[in-house]
Image: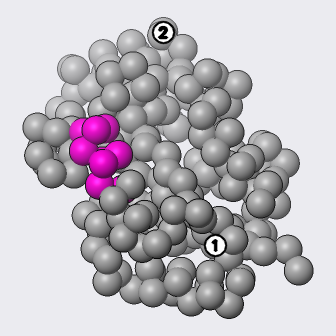
């Protein structure tokens, strides 16, 4: 029996930007998407709650040998907005501690979504950092002159603008920014 792998991510289990991106990348890598059990943690803070129901389910799956490996995918966000969990360093420290607290060191790895150059942000920052400069400047210019209220924080706006403005482009999985995530996914499936 081929064991499943678990991917914990922000948002809902069925429909989220994280699941969409990860599913497309898994398919692009020609990995078996049917082996993945997605766990939507809703908000980032739930990753750091040891008694979260998703962790109980994971522990049972591991004990029954249904799941062999785990990947946590979460946003870095910004330290200025959350001094405990915000920013790359804080997120890294806290997810490593949670992996240890859950006794998952031999089963788990993590990937922190952000703009790789500045080590902060979220999924949309990661995506924007991988699109050509011209498209990125166009989106930023549009946001600068628009009437959107929450230009800096509304991730959904950035994601939707990119999808609407460049529907034929999709994600550029050949971009260097995706290399580390691709490596982690390949490792996850090669257990």
> Magenta span covers which residues?
87-95
Q: Which mark is residue 134?
A: 2
Dot 1 surroundings within 10 Å: few (below 14), some, or many (20 or more)?
some
Q: Is residue 137 visible?
A: yes
* Mark 1 secondary-structure assignment: strand
Residue 63 in the figure: left or right of residue 128: right
The vertical placement of 2 against 126, above or below, is: below
- How far across and down, in percent of the image, does residue 78 sit? 21, 38
Quarter where residue 4 is shown: bottom right
Residue 32 in the figure: left or right of residue 168: right
Residue at 78% across / 74% down in the picture? 3
Q: Earlier in the sequence, mark 2 or mark 1?
A: 1
Residue at 11% across / 37% down in the picture? 80
Q: Residue furthest toward the right?
A: 1
Q: Which residue position is annotated with label 1?
A: 37
Residue at 31% across / 38% down in the picture? 88
Residue 62 in the figure: left or right of residue 49: right
Camera-side residue of 155 and 52: 52
Magenta segment main secondary structure: helix
Camera-side residue of 105 and 1: 105
- How far across and down, in percent of the image, does residue 177 sit? 56, 26
Q: Nearer the viewer, mark 2 or mark 1?
A: 1
Image quarter hosting the C terminus? bottom right
What's the distance in space between the residues labelled 2 and 1, CA to CA? 37 Å
């Amino acid at each position: 029996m081929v064991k499943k792998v678990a991917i914990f991510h922000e948002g809902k289990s069925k429909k989220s930007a994280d699941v969409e991106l990860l599913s497309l990348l898994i398919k692009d890598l020609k990995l078996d998407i049917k082996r993945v059990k997605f766990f939507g943690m809703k908000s980032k803070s739930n990753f750091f709650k040891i008694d979260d129901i998703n962790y109980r389910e994971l522990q049972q799956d591991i004990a029954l040998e249904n799941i062999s490996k785990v990947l946590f995918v979460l946003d870095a966000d910004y330290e200025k907005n959350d001094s405990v969990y915000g920013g790359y360093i804080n997120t890294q420290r806290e997810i490593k501690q949670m992996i240890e607290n859950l006794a998952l060191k031999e089963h788990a790895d993590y990937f922190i979504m952000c703009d790789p150059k500045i080590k902060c942000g979220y999924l949309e920052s990661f995506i924007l950092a991988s699109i050509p400069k011209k498209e990125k400047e166009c989106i930023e210019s549009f946001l600068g002159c628009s009437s959107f209220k929450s230009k800096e924080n509304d991730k959904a706006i950035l994601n939707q603008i990119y999808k609407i403005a460049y529907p034929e482009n999709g994600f550029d999985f050949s971009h260097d920014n995706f290399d580390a995530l691709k490596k982690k996914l390949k490792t996850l499936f090669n257990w």
